[in-house]
Every structure is written in C-alpha cells, then in structure tokens.
Image: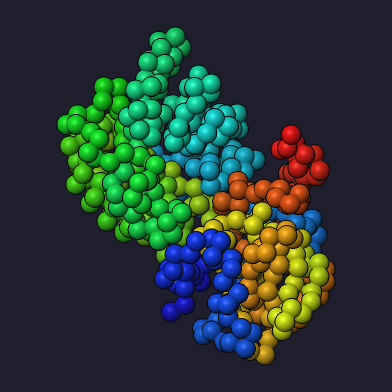
C-alpha cells in the first residue's frame, strides 16, 4: 500500500543512493519522471483544513493551531503514561508565539545554542536543557544562567568548563545537572548528512573514552541517533546503548534519548514507546528525557506561495513561484524529499496538466517536480506546500537577497493572525 507520509519523509528512490548534493543537482533532471510516465498508485494530496488561503499574504508560513494542539495532546499522553520528561527541541520548531500552548503539555525545551537557550527562558518561561557541540568561552557564563541541564559533547569540553560550572553553582545557589553525549556507533539514519554515528563523527564520544565510572560531576548520558524514526528503531538502538554503556547507565541520574522520535506520525505506536521507557527507567533507576523537534510541528502547517510565471522549457511546463526551495525549504534539497502540494498529484499522470516548480533564486537546482493537477495552473494561482512547520522557518536564508516568507497563525476559532513580515532590513542586517 502506498504510504504518503513515508514517501515524503524518506523517499524510496533516494534510499538507494547517497548523493553528493552537488552531483545531485547536476543529474537530478535525468531522473525526474517525464510527463508521460504514470506512477501507480498515485494519490492526490487532500488536506482537511479550515484555512482560507485566498485571503492570506503570499509567501507565508501558516501554522494551524488546532493541529498543533492535536500533536501536543499525543505527546502529553506519552509523557504522562511513561513518566518521562518530554521537551521541545527548538532547533526543529521555534515558533515562540505558540510556546504558551506548548508549555501546557510539555516540560520545557532543549537548546543547542546561546540564542535558543535565551529564547526558551524569555518565551517559554523555563530554564533550558542545553546541549551544544562546543561551548564558547565568551558565552559560557550567560549560557549557565539559562540552563537547568548542560550536556557536553566531549570529555575535553567537560574538563575545560567544569570548574566554571561549580563556581557558578556556588555563587548563585542554582544547581545545573551536567551530562556527556555518547555515541553508540549505531544509527539507522540513511542520509549521511543527518547520521551522527558515521565513522569519525564529531557528535558525542564512544565507549572506549570512558573508564568504569562516570567522571565526578557528571550525572547524565545523552544520545541522539534517530531522525524521524519509530519506537522500534529506538528499541534496536537501545540494545547497542546498553551493550556499550550499561555499566555507566547504572550510575546515571538521567538518560536523554535525544530527538528524532516521530511520535505524532499516523503509524507511530505510542504504547510501544511507553513500554520501552518504563522498562528502561525501572532497569536503571534513571529519569528518561525525550526531546523531539519534528514531532511537535509535524503536519501542523503550510507554506503558501503564488505562481508568478509559466513557460515551456524543452517540453516541460515550468511554474515559477514566489518562494525558494533552497532558501525557504532547504531540507527538500538536503535530505532530499519531495514535499506534498495541496490538490496536486505527487507524481506526474499522463493526460493531466503537469508542472515543475521553480524557486525564485538563481541557483540552478532551486526547483522541484514534477506534479500533476486536474486543471491547468494560471499566473496568480495559490500553491500550498503541506507540512512546512518543522525545520523550515529555523533554516531559512536570504540567499540571493530574496525576501523571507511572512509568518502567521490560523487560530482555532478560524481567524488569521500575521505574526511577522520581513523586508530589506532583514537582508541588510545580516551583512556588513
């Protein structure tokens, strides 16, 4: 059976090949299905929504509030039934206007930089769980003021900063629980760019760097090896974690399972996850922490765009948009994956109007396709990309000087609130 979610997040074709991104851009057009090809079964993307896209600014990221609450309720169920600590990973979803709602259901947030940690304190009104590949000397004191948990990437980093942690605790009487990121040398992430366990990985340390005991002052262990995976992947991962670090797990107060748990996906089995967490906590007498990012924003919103031009390019109909795949949806090119478009067929169908969508930058590879529609497109038509709330706004750029999409919320009582719009100053402020 065709599973559209699986196709979008992990396209079968690209599971077979690990492309260098530059090579991918060069040869992708040769592998794009021609307009005469029919891929079966092909489903048209129909997303039930109350959003009236005709009245909204374009381009615009639009978060649908009722869908966010639906996800948060699912996550809260896991948190309550398992007894774990469940926090939002800001690197995946940082729409801070939603933090009051998020805080009703989750325990807080995890930050990977000084600015994310500050955002957590200012907008979520709680101290952050912090992990960063490196901590900077000039930022460290401020970072401590935002943290309740602080995970170090290596023992070197711990040795460098541990005395400053102790001094801060004595001066402020605020306790910070410190941990070390571990690398179990096992990950089922297919795309190497997102795999933290590749040989020579810079993320976390392997078991051979530890002795028989945790370093004095270290209370937790942190691993993050998943990317949009299910609980069965976690189960297989825990086998490796326990085999290599079991003696240290018994000494820890907490173990952070990292992110990549796609708990809000349709086919995810939350009860299996709950059983895994309960069993692990009982076995090692530790607190388990989960920090999903994508799962919070999964299928909660859209990127609205408008057709600006349509022309024939060597037999292919190209529709130019007022958005950029490279600047506004970079994961579509990095992972890569093919995003769903409302009322479009995910693959070209013979006899139906079919288009390749072009982004607005000068990058040759800033395009996506092909898609079929029941009716021809016209200049001015709205094109709505689905599932555009996670790892989009947090990764946008002003490459080529293109404007950033506006950001808005479609509230549960069916009205639109424009949160932010951007102009020239946003572009200029990032340059010298």
The one of 360 and 62 positioned closer to us in this rendering: 360
Residue drawn at the location 38% of the way across and 34% of the way down: 153
How many numbered marks appear?
A: 0
Please indicate whether residue 323 sits to the left or right of residue 391 in the image.
Answer: right
The color scheme shown is rainbow
**Quadrant in the rendering for residue 357:** bottom right
- Residue 142 in the image: above or below residue 63: above
Left or right of 422, for residue 143? left
Quadrant occupied by the C terminus: top right
Q: Nearer the viewer, residue 249 or 162?
A: 162
Picture layout, residue 168 above or below residue 226: above
At horizontal 79% and vertical 55% (from top left) the residue drawn is 57
Estimate the x, y position of residue 304 in percent, counting from the top left. Answer: 71, 60
Residue 190 visible in the picture: yes
The quadrant holding residue 130 is: top left
Is 14 displayed left or right of 57 in the figure?
Answer: left
Q: Please name the residue shown 45% across and 53% down the image.
A: 194
Visible residue check, residue 416: no
In the picture, the quarter occupied by the N terminus is bottom left
330 horizontally vs 267: left or right? right
281 vs 226: above or below? above
Residue located 56% across and 46% down the image = 93
Residue 73 placed where, x, y %? 49, 50
169 or 71: nearer the viewer: 169
> Horizontal and vertical percent for residue 99?
58, 39
Residue 26, x across and y down, in percent: 59, 68
């Amino acid at each position: 059976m065709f599973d559209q979610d699986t196709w979008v997040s992990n396209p079968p074709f690209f599971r077979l090949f690990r492309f260098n991104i530059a090579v991918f851009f060069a040869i992708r057009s040769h592998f794009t299905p021609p307009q005469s090809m029919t891929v079966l079964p092909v489903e048209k993307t129909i997303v039930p929504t109350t959003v009236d896209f005709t009245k909204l600014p374009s381009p615009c990221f639009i978060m649908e509030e009722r869908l966010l609450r639906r996800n948060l309720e699912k996550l809260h169920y896991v948190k309550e039934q398992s007894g774990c600590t469940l926090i939002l990973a800001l690197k995946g979803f940082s729409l801070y206007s939603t933090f009051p709602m998020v805080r009703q259901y989750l325990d807080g947030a995890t930050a990977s930089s000084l600015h994310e940690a500050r955002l957590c304190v200012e907008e979520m009104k709680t101290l952050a769980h912090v992990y960063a590949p490196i901590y900077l000397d000039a930022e460290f004191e401020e970072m401590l003021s935002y943290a309740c948990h602080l995970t170090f990437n290596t023992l070197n980093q711990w040795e460098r900063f541990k005395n400053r942690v102790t001094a801060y605790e004595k001066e402020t009487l605020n306790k910070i629980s410190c941990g070390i990121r571990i690398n179990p040398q096992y990950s089922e992430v297919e795309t190497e760019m997102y795999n933290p366990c590749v040989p020579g990985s810079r993320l976390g340390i392997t078991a051979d760097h530890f002795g028989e005991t945790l370093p004095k002052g270290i209370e937790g262990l942190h691993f993050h090896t998943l990317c949009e995976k299910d609980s069965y992947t976690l189960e297989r991962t825990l086998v490796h974690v326990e085999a290599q670090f079991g003696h240290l797990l018994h000494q820890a107060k907490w173990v952070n399972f990292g992110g990549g748990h796609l708990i809000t996906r349709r086919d995810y089995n939350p009860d299996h996850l709950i059983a895994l967490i309960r069993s692990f906590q009982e076995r090692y007498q530790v607190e388990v922490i989960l920090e999903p990012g994508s799962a919070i924003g999964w299928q909660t919103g859209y990127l609205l765009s408008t057709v600006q031009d349509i022309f024939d390019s060597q037999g292919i109909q190209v529709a130019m948009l007022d958005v950029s795949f490279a600047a506004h949806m970079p994961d579509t090119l990095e992972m890569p994956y093919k995003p769903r478009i409302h009322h479009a067929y995910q693959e070209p169908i013979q006899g139906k109007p079919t288009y390749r969508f072009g982004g607005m930058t000068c990058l040759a590879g800033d395009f996506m396709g092909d898609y079929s529609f029941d009716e021809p497109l016209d200049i001015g038509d709205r094109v709505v990309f689905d599932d555009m709330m996670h790892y989009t706004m947090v990764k946008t750029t002003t490459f080529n000087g293109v404007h950033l999409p506006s950001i808005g919320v479609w509230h549960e009582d069916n009205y639109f609130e424009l949160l932010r719009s951007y102009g020239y100053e946003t572009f200029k402020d990032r340059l010298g």
